[in-house]
Amino acid sequence: MTITEKILAVHSGREEIMPGDLINAKVDLILANDITAPIAISEFKKIGAKNVFDKNRIVLVPDHFAPQKDIKAAEQCKMLREFSKEYQLSLYFEVGRMGIEHALLPEEGLVVPGDLIIGADSHTCTYGALGAFSTGVGSTDVAVAMATGECWFKVPESIKCIYYGRLNKWVGGKDLILYTIGDIGVDGALYRAMEFEGETIRTLPMYGRLTMCNMAIEAGGKNGIIVPDEITESYVKERAKRPYAFYTSDNSAQYVKIREYDCSKIPLTVSCPHLPSNVRPAAELFEIYIDQVVVGSCTNGRLEDLREAAMIIKGRKVNPHVRMIVIPATQKIYRQAMKEGLLDIFIEAEAVVSTPTCGPCLGGHMGILAKGERAIATTNRNFVGRMGHPESEVYLSNPAVAAASAVLGRIGIPEELGL
């Protein structure tokens, strides 16, 4: 069996499962946010549930429209707070203690290898970077899982993506996953497990792995996953709040597709409007002028991402025709970035630094685009109207390209700044 099949088998109490099997499985953790949790809470009450299955296994994070941007957002966040209080949930993260959910949970050691995690947010697939089965579900599934501790699944087929070769300068996990999505398309892994492996992955730091698994959903994937190793162990051993288990894929495991990528041939990559799969080398897009740069999100708002952007922009200024918004993904990241002087670098460059929020990524707040405006962002989606007006445009990149573009006023690469 593959690692995905093994984790699902263990959680469904079966020795063996196959793609296409319908199973009921016990979940280790349930997640919802200020957009999806209110629906789940309403459904939870409709089905007449008397209590939650485990007050220590349900995570509620107000991060999309938080800090609350208007009255409707405030009402939704209030529902999370009141539900958490009513059922004494230990994992409710209020503003000031929260962060963007998919950066917060790994950081806090709440998701661990071998887990089965569901979340009412499509980017829940992020946690596969730790060797867990993690996937997004609907709010009604979350409601039932909060009551029963279980969820149903159709066991997905698996695709294996093998990466080898040395990464070019400034190229990282974001470029690898954008390049992959460009190759297979936004439905290339539809309802399939995307298993990332190879010598390049084995040396890829955890933040790069989290970025890759985060965007498995942009290829239609059911989940993204990486077999845990020494890098995983060093990341989780000091964070894990629960025991964990390392699973691996058998040599005889079956895959419906195997793709191989020579990373020495993968350039700094940008996804152009209006699909994540519409990729081009960043160096070819020098004629695309921009109005806004966003560095942040559950994809690239981690400390290493901020360090990368700061390396590019240190001693320089944001182009006078551009606004740059930097959003550390969690309070801990914000604080460490402050200690390291990263925030000073951004502010000196005339960028603005925000408290943790999903904000502009989903066109929520803190960076909405007007008609005709263009942004380059380290976020994960660039659909029509994703960051604001339907006639605006979003380009996706890694933090180094985003920061270089902020200085140049157009899409560019660090080499143009002599880096």
Image (tube, rainbow, N blue to C red):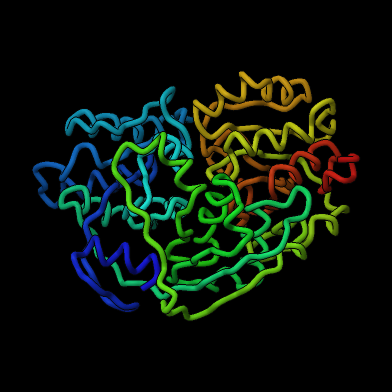
Would residue 393 be seen by someone viewing this image from the given angle? no
Question: Where residue 333 sits: x, y (%)?
Answer: 54, 29
Question: Where residue 80 sits: x, y (%)?
Answer: 30, 34
x 68%, y 26%: residue: 352
Residue 296's quadrant in the figure? top right
x 61%, y 25%: residue: 337
Question: Where residue 215 sits: x, y (%)?
Answer: 54, 57
Left-right relation of 39 to 277: left
x 25%, y 31%: residue: 90
Q: Nearer the viewer, residue 228 or 136?
A: 228
x 39%, y 70%: residue: 2
Q: Quadrant of the N terminus?
A: bottom left
Q: Quadrant of the C terminus?
A: top right
Q: Nearer the viewer, residue 196 or 300?
A: 196
In the rendered image, the vertical position of residue 95 relative to residue 202, given as above or below: above
In the rendered image, the vertical position of residue 90 relative to residue 42, given as above or below: above
Question: Where residue 242 sits: x, y (%)?
Answer: 29, 40
